[in-house]
């Protein structure tokens, strides 16, 4: 069943390339993918726990390399996120003037890549599926992007290409660090063996650094973040939604899924470095975000900034912190996708998205004002939204990190992170005021709400944020047991 | 089961028959000749699966281990694709070699690659310096003729002269190196040299001198920096099918010989460190030069020339990281063979598309690929796959190759080379994707639809498919590389018994 979630978009993309009606096929595939992900999510047996829906096909038996899929609570939450955001992204896509088929095929490939990475339980395919999204992104930004689209497309592709190869070296290093008899690409098997001290503590430092750098570049960890904002601002709306909302979570997911269980000592060795960098994400990028004059760049930088909180939760290496980080991945994916979708609606009337050129839009487009307000509040982390529930959990986790970590450093980083919440409030509220309140901007009087059918994807995203915000326990019930199993005993 | 040597013999006979038919046939249309050769060579690929490992009396010179058979198949398949390209290239050839009849000179152009193929196949099996030298010369001399084949075009002649002079020079280095090694070890058989070196009573300085001379000669063949100067001009000037053959065949030949001689050269721990150090230096320099010089190229043929240097660098990473592992992840032999097989597929595919596009666009700059995805989605997709594979994107043959190469470097703790490799892969993304950007981002210069001949279409489709198969299911290819370690197939050698 998990294979279907991955291969439905791929098959649909091939069908579209061969001439099937583009939008209808893509929409059908996205809906099917979402329905399957939801079904898997609901039918997961929480009592039994562990990995379910497993399926394994041997690829290279000598290296114990398989095509293997399986899902625990954490993967299911991420697959659900993939399904929702893909559906919303395809839904809000405006009419594509040129080469519609290629556009939807590329979007579906990105979604398939993300779903494949989250569903894989084999290191090789986990890595490979993520790279499936690289070239479609390159084509999408270059062909259908706006502004400095060529520069942005080159930057994201080369940056992520280098990040991926660093990650590849890290994964190979990890594989070879395992004693020869028990070498395998199977993540479940590796996780099981890791409980018995699979890799000696001294040998964990180097592979972890490779993984941290590789994943870090993919997540836009400070100072490797400069690819993200221009790419998101130039990319067509659905690509920005998918990339910022889903694909960037791959690196974080990888750190939790691969680095924590196998290299816990390495994680402790490099914890101080990670703390410094993540404070850079929160404070430095936060200040950069305040200075932005364009809505799309502002959202791009804000998405880079919020990665800092997730890193903080992961760095704490305890159940509370990492669970909070996992839920924050879900919440941030939904909120940033909603914000980019709304920015896409605004872009149709005001292509440059300069904050100063808007004003009083809430008068002519009340629904958008309301929705943007909700999404902005969610992004800041106001109570009631999933972002709040998860951020506060991250803070609790960081207050008392796992044994072997210096608690004072974490508390210091946490104080910076709390200031980050104020910074997000500043830029989000200023953006909201500049766009929706005040005197009506020049030529902005006829900026109206999108037609009713296009509102549903945003409503869907916001509703999920509220549900997860009011009942975070339902989601923690999924991620906590999985993370408990991943954390070192 | 058939004796392995009969494969080479059949190829040689095929070449001679082609020459005879060319001389005595009345027909002006020589394409049938090339088509016959294509089907014959494909049949031989099939026969190669029934070759037996036992080579009888030839053992002191010749082996038929899995590596040898693997490279023989590479040689055969490369020649098949090169002949398909040569068919597409017919008009250019006839334009630059006006003769008494319309088809004059085409027959030789189709038959010479067959002789090169025989040389490559001999080389895959050669385990004695004498056979290595003779087969290398068979390859090189037929290349001298082919590179300068378009005798009325100055670029082709210039390429021919450059290749001839530098090729002859490298041959000189090789012979001189072999002499020194024979002088200190008293042997030309690689296994016997290995035993003498391993015994440890070889004077170091003259031995290393000979080794370095041989490495220089092979450096020319595989286009390693600083022996790469001939590559861009020769690649750009030679007829495009021959460029493809050079970049694949010559490189494969160089690397199989390198693998074989290194087994002998690295036998002693006293000298192996120094030799590996030299190889690591070569690898780093080749990676940096090839990738950086490829960045500003605007001509696609020249870009592929620099890319061929760059890939020699990645292959040399694996050579410089030779470690204990003979199979599995981390084995240099497997990594090199796999990488070369993948490199063959993607390079031949690039050149095949290039020839078709250049025929229609009257030029082979990257700008001539603008908007190809609109003019011919099929060709654009083929070239897209080739470029992604060259850049090393997962699910393609090139990725598995890079994966294996980096695994050998991690295994051997060659972190300096890994660092260089990471940067150069990033550079590779730029120059390979420039072609993709031209095909997909840009609008076409003219809107004429490009038609593709059926045989070419089939070849492009097959190469594309194989790139995916190699990238997703590596097991069959890895199985065909499994074999006995070199020691167990050594037989008593007449010289050794003295």
Image: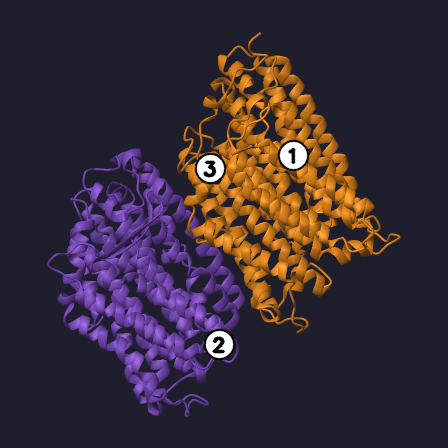
> Cα distance, mark 1 to mark 2?
55 Å
In the rendered image, which residue does mark 1 sit on? Answer: B9
Task: Nearest to the eye among marks 1 and 3: give it.
Answer: 1
Chain B: give its colour: orange
Specify the color scheme.
by chain
Q: Local crowd at mark 2 within 10 Å, few (<14), some, or many (≥20)?
A: some
Chain holding disc 1:
B
In the rendered image, which residue does mark 3 sit on? Answer: B481
Residue B185: name its quadrant.
top right
Q: How far across and down, in percent of the image, does residue B409 sit?
A: 44, 37
> Cα distance, mark 3 to mark 2?
45 Å
Q: How far across and down, in percent of the image, does residue B12 sit?
A: 68, 37
Q: Nearer the viewer, residue A5 or B413?
A: A5
Q: Secondary structure at mark 2?
A: helix
In the image, are marks 3 and 2 on the same chain? no
Q: Nearer the viewer, residue A339 or B92?
A: B92
In the image, are marks 1 and 2 on the same chain? no
Q: How far across and down, in percent of the image, does residue A317 sit?
A: 21, 50
């Amino acid at each position: 069943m998990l294979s279907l979630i991955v291969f439905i978009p791929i098959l649909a993309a091939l069908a579209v390339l061969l001439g099937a009606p583009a939008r209808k096929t893509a929409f059908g595939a996205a809906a099917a993918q979402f329905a399957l992900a939801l079904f898997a999510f609901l039918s997961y047996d929480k009592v039994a726990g562990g990995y379910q829906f497993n399926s394994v096909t041997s690829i290279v038996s000598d290296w114990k390399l398989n095509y293997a899929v399986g899902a625990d609570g954490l993967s299911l939450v991420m697959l659900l996120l993939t399904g929702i955001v893909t559906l919303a992204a395809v839904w809000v896509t405006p009419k594509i003037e040129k080469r519609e088929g290629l556009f939807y095929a590329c979007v579906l490939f990105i979604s398939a890549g993300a779903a494949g990475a989250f569903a894989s339980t084999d290191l090789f395919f986990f890595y490979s599926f993520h790279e499936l999204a690289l070239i479609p992104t390159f084509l999408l930004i270059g062909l259908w992007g706006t502004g400095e689209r060529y520069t942005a497309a080159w930057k994201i592709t080369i940056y992520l290409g280098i990040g991926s190869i660093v990650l590849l070296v890290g994964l190979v290093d990890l594989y070879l660090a395992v004693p020869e008899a028990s070498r395998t690409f199977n993540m479940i098997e590796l996780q099981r063996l890791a409980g018995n001290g699979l890799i000696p503590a001294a040998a964990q430092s180097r592979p972890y650094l490779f993984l941290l750098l590789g994943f870090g570049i993919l997540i836009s960890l400070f100072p490797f973040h400069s690819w993200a904002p221009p790419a998101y601002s130039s990319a067509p709306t659905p690509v920005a939604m998918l990339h910022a909302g889903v694909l960037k979570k791959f690196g974080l997911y990888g750190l939790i899924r691969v680095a924590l269980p196998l290299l816990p000592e390495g994680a402790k060795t490099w914890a101080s470095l990670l703390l410094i960098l993540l404070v850079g994400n929160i404070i430095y990028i936060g200040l950069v975000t305040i200075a932005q004059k364009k809505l799309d760049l502002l959202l791009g930088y804000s998405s880079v900034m919020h990665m800092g909180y997730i890193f903080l939760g992961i760095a704490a290496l305890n159940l509370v912190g990492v669970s909070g980080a996992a839920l924050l991945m879900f919440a941030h994916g939904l909120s940033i996708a909603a914000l980019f979708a709304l920015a896409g609606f605004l872009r149709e009337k005001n292509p440059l998205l300069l904050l100063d050129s808007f004003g009083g839009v809430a008068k002519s487009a009340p629904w958008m004002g309301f929705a943007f307000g909700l999404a902005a509040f969610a992004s800041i982390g106001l109570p009631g939204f999933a972002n709040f529930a998860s951020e506060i959990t991250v803070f609790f986790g960081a207050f008392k990190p796992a044994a072997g970590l210096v608690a004072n450093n974490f508390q210091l980083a946490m104080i910076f992170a709390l200031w980050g919440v104020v910074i997000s409030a500043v830029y989000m509220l200023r953006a909201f005021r500049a766009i929706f309140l005040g005197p009506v901007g020049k030529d902005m009087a006829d900026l109206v709400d999108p037609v009713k059918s296009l509102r549903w994807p945003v409503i869907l995203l916001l509703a999920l944020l509220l549900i997860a915000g009011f009942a975070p326990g339902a989601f923690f019930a999924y991620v906590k047991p999985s993370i408990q199993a991943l954390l070192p005993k | 089961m058939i004796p392995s040597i009969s494969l080479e013999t059949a190829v040689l006979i095929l070449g001679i028959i082609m020459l005879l038919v060319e001389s005595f046939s009345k027909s002006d249309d020589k394409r049938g000749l090339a088509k016959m050769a294509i089907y014959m060579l494909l049949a031989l690929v099939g026969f190669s699966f029934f070759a037996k490992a036992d080579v009888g009396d030839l053992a002191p010179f010749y082996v038929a281990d899995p590596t040898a058979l693997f490279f023989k198949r590479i040689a055969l398949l490369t020649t098949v694709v090169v002949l398909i390209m040569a068919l597409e290239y017919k008009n250019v050839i006839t334009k630059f070699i006006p003769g008494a009849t319309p088809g004059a000179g085409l027959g030789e152009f189709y038959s010479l690659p067959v002789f090169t193929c025989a040389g490559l196949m001999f080389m895959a099996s050669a385990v004695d310096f004498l056979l290595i030298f003779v087969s290398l010369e068979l390859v090189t001399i037929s290349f001298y003729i082919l590179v300068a084949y378009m005798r009325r075009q100055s670029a082709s002649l210039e390429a021919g002269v450059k290749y001839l002079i530098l090729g002859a020079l490298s041959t000189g280095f090789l012979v001189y190196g072999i002499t020194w090694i024979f002088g200190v070890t008293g042997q030309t058989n690689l296994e016997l040299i290995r035993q003498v070196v391993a015994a440890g009573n070889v004077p170091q300085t003259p031995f290393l001198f000979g080794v370095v001379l041989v490495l220089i000669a092979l450096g020319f063949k595989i286009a390693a920096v600083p022996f790469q100067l001939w590559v861009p001009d020769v690649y750009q000037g030679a007829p495009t099918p021959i460029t493809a053959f050079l970049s694949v065949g010559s490189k494969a030949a160089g690397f199989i010989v390198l693998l074989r001689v290194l087994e002998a050269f690295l036998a002693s721990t006293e000298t192996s460190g120094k030799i590996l150090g030299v190889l690591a230096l070569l690898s780093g320099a080749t990676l940096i030069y090839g990738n950086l010089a490829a960045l500003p190229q605007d001509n696609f043929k020249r870009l592929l020339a620099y890319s061929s240097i760059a890939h020699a660098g990645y292959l040399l990473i694996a050579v410089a990281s030779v470690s204990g592992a003979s199979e599995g992840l981390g084995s240099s032999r497997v990594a090199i063979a796999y990488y070369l097989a993948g490199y063959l597929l993607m390079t031949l595919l690039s050149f095949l598309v290039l020839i078709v596009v250049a025929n229609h666009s009257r030029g082979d700059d990257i700008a001539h690929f603008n908007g190809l995805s609109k003019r011919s989605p099929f060709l654009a997709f083929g070239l897209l796959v080739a470029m992604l594979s060259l850049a090393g994107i997962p699910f393609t043959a090139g990725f598995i190759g890079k994966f294996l190469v980096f695994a050998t470097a991690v295994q051997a703790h060659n972190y300096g080379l890994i660092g260089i490799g990471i940067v150069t892969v990033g550079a590779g993304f730029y120059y390979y994707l420039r072609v993709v950007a031209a095909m997909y981002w840009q609008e076409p210069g003219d809107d004429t639809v490009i038609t593709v001949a059926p045989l070419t279409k089939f070849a492009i489709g097959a190469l594309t498919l194989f790139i995916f198969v190699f990238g997703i299911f590596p097991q069959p290819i890895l199985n065909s590389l499994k074999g006995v370690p070199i020691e167990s197939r050594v037989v008593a050698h007449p010289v050794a018994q003295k």
